[in-house]
Image: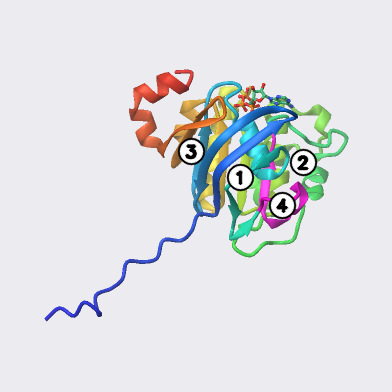
Amino acid sequence: MNDPLSSPLPPPVPPPLLTVEGLQAWYGRAHILDGVALSVGRGEVVALMGRNGAGKTTTLKAVMGLAQRRAAVLRFDGRDLAALPAHRIARLGIGYVPEDRRIFADLTVEENLEVGRQPPRPGAPAWTPDKLYELFPNLKEMRGRRGTRMSGGEQQMLTLARTLMGNPSLLLLDEPSEGLAPLIVRQMAEAVRRLKAEGLSVLLSEQSLSFAAAVADRACVIETGRLRWTGAMADLLADRQVRTAYLAV
Ligand SMILES: Nc1ncnc2c1ncn2[C@@H]1O[C@H](COP(=O)(O)OP(=O)(O)OP(=O)(O)O)[C@@H](O)[C@H]1O
């Protein structure tokens, strides 16, 4: 006879690492985001997509505490981010890689990495320069080179590598493929896939559907600061209507 009490319970669904609901953001009096909602699960890569000016960068900045914002829910790893300044949010384990490459141009690759070094964090992959050089072989070849003598793509990789030296558990990556040569774009996509394989969670803003398709599990599509669509990356690729309406393809 079947005993209902002995039948196995389904495994509990872990809460997402990052949950954002009802996000509003402003620059001065300009109201930019109106009700953006998204989540990033542990080990998941989520692409925040939309055309120029849709509000992708502002969403990442708002999560990071770098834009004036208010949200119904803004939780990371069980912590409420609403009242925290950016440096406290970074310490909790969110790494932010802005669009404009922010390396220290007068320092070498190696020195730039040391600047980003933080103690290992439980539940997040621990990075060393050697491990990062495996991820970005180009950087290894130029470890003694100063930032002034690096291409835009190399600087982008160094910015990402330096952020990883802080051992984040969630990475906010702003338009990682923008302005990069096709070969570097492929290397960047491979790096994001490796980060996922290491267990890192990633929220990236992206205009390129092919880059997002190569790396992301799910996508959120925004337009004029509002969430228009969310779902599996494969479903976005199959949905021509959404792509035509909100993306530049
Ligand atoms: N510092 C600022 N002050 C005022 N308005 C701003 C500021 N930065 C961005 N905006 C405006 O906010 C809106 C959203 O910009 P945001 O940079 O978030 O878009 P995006 O989707 O990241 O676009 P892009 O792909 O061009 O970077 C745009 O209308 C932009 O003009």
Q: Amino acid at mark 1?
A: Ala
Badge nearest the viewer, 2 or 4: 4
Quadrant of the image where one finds ligand 1: top right
Q: Is residue 82 magenta?
A: yes
Q: Rounded to the nearest whole Å, what is the CA distance between mark 2 and mark 4?
A: 39 Å
- In the image, is the residue at mark 1 within 8 Å of ligand 1 by its beta carbon? no
Residue 216's disc is: none
Residue 215's disc is: 3
Of callouts 3 and 1, which one flags the residue occurring earlier in the amino acid sequence? Answer: 1
Secondary structure, mark 1, is: loop
Q: Which x, y percent locates residue 242?
A: 39, 25
- Where does label 1 land, which residue? 71
Q: Quadrant of residue 206?
A: top right
Which residue ends up furthest to the front in the rendered image? 29
**Residue placed at 65% from the left, 51% from the top?**
131
- Where does label 4 land, which residue? 83
Q: Residues within 10 Å of mark 3 (few under 14, many from 20)?
A: many
Secondary structure, mark 3, is: helix
Q: Which x, y percent locates residue 175?
A: 61, 30
Quarter holding the N terminus is: bottom left
- Residue 105, placed above or below residue 80: above
- Residue 88, placed above or below residue 47: below
Q: Which x, y percent locates residue 151?
A: 73, 26
The answer to whether any part of residue 139 appears in the image is: yes
Q: Rounded to the nearest whole Å, what is the CA distance between mark 1 and mark 4?
A: 10 Å
Q: Residues within 10 Å of mark 1 (few under 14, many from 20)?
A: many
